[in-house]
Image (cartoon, rainbow, N blue to C red):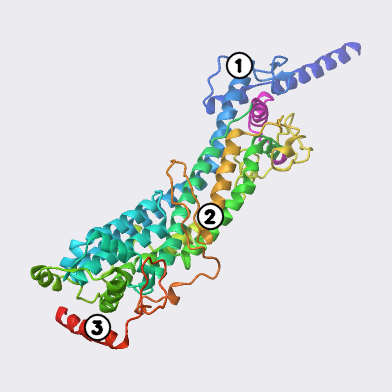
Amino acid sequence: MVRLETIFCTFLLSVAARADLKARNCSEVREACASRGFSFGYVPLQEVPGENLRVCPQGNTCCTVEMEDKFGQQSKQDFETLVDEISHNLRSTFVSRHKRFDEFFLELLENTERSLNEMFVKTYGKPYMQNSEVFENLFAELKRYYTGGNVNLEEMLNDFWSRLLERMFTLLNSQYVITEDYLECISKYTDELKPFGDVPRKLKAQVTRAFIAARTFVQGLSVGREVAQRVAKVSSTASCIRALTRLMYCPFCQGMPSVKPCKNYCLNVMKGCLANQADLDPEWNQYIDAMLLVAQRLEGPFNIESVMEPIDVKISEAIMNMQDNSAQVSYRVFQGCGQPKPAGMSRSARGVSDVFTARFKPYSPEERPTTAAGTSLDRLVADIKEKLKTSKKFWSGLPDMLCDGDRVTQGNSTDEDCWNGHSKGRYFPEVQKDGLTNQVSNPEVEVDITRPDTNIRQQIMALRVMTNKLKNAYNGNDIYFQDSGDEGSGSGSGSGCTEDCPTESESPASEAPVVEADRSEPVGASVPLHTPPVAMTTALVLLALTLQRQWR
């Protein structure tokens, strides 16, 4: 009987030993490591003592110190790759949209200049070609402003109209010798005479606010692109790498390579590793809101496309206005600056045929050039607005995006079937809030909340500066700005326009501007202008009409 009991106990011990031996088998770990491309010098066939492990649970293990070290390197690489993949759409959105908008605005400028040149050559001929550098300089300065040059838009536009007045006055008074000193005197009366009617004032407001909005919006896309690219390049601390190793690869050491981490466990690790990125979110969200505000302006009163396409029509109206009122303008200039010396007959006769005599005809819709970048500004803006809206709260949402699905965690597993950092089972600690200061009690990652990431702080400051500039652009104002390429931009220009900005409908291009020639007091003049007697005015008007009939 005793012998029978002894045999039975030996059998039970043998069965238990076989079961224990099976539980300690590491063949599944060896296969999983090989499938992932790991090349270890040695992988245990069955569990070995793990007292030398520094990250994963000690005790019986399927890992060696060499394996644990390589798991640490791989977990860092996996983490960086995951963040790069998740942020790819955001980064590519800013890269591609910045390129599209930049191409659109530059091509719009080129198309507008080409359109004006072709139509003015056809309409005005020789007088225009002899003075085309005035218009070339206008577009060169507009382009220089857009591309980041230090250009004051208001001063530049004032200078354009002054140069145009000098050229036209000389052409329309070719029977006189107009010296440089005399032209300087004429410029003093530009504001009072309003030789081009109200076109310069309206066009200055429209061009200034449209270019400020366009340039600032593209600069905003550039800043967003740079910030996204720099923040997406995560730098992991030693504590973060240990936590990532424990999260992703310590199940291998426990003989459970197919078991993935619990979601809440994953969230605590990612919130600790991405604490600084989450701190970017408040400034990032304000920047996105400011971008959306300027995008609204681009669709409405600050639409650079609607301002630039008819600019040839508007400048032509100003030229026609100057020609129609040339006699009155000339007389008042003569009153203030004196009578210029008469020119010889040959010059006078030659000048008569050189004045602007033709009326301008705008393009028909069929003749207009293909819209820049193959689409309209409205469509570009509608597209980027949707992209911007979805990018809000991106950085604080990174941990959730990393831990959702099956990238890291066991997507649809129960709380009992996941890795909790120690074994297979439920994860009990509370999920931490976002941001650096909220990681003081993070159970998975040791975070030094007294040392913010320098790179992240720099990006926060870049966003803050850009947000301020966008808010100014929304109101039609410009402030000095240097982009990431250290290119200076215009300073001090802007219409000061706020919510109640005049729109295109309030200053239609088809209406000829009214000349305000009769004003009792000069503005900024060094020599007073006097209202001529009625008889003399009547005689001059009749003379002017006679001369215009001859010119035409």
User: What's under tag 1, amino acid-wise?
Assistant: Glu
Q: Residue 409, located in which quarter of the rendered image?
A: top right
Asked whether the viewer can see residue 120, the reply is yes
Q: Nearer the viewer, residue 297 or 65?
A: 297
Image point 56% across, 53% down: which residue?
288
Q: Earlier in the sequence, mark 2 or mark 3?
A: 2
How packed mark 3 is, by other alpha carbons closer than 10 Å (few <14, some 14-19, many 20 or more), is some
Split into 4 quadrants, where in the image is the N terminus? top right
Q: Secondary structure at mark 2?
A: helix
Q: Single out the mark in the foreground, 2 or 3.
A: 3
Whether residue 51 sits left or right of residue 367 in the image: it is right
Q: Residue 332, located in which quarter of the rendered image?
A: bottom left
Residue 327 in percent (x, y) is at 25, 78
Image point 32% across, 85% down: which residue?
533
Which residue, given by chain and number where applicable, does mark 3 sit on?
Answer: 540
Q: Which residues are magenta?
A: 238-264
Q: Earlier in the sequence, mark 1 or mark 3?
A: 1
User: What's under tag 3, amino acid-wise?
Assistant: Leu
Q: Nearer the viewer, residue 10 or 408?
A: 408
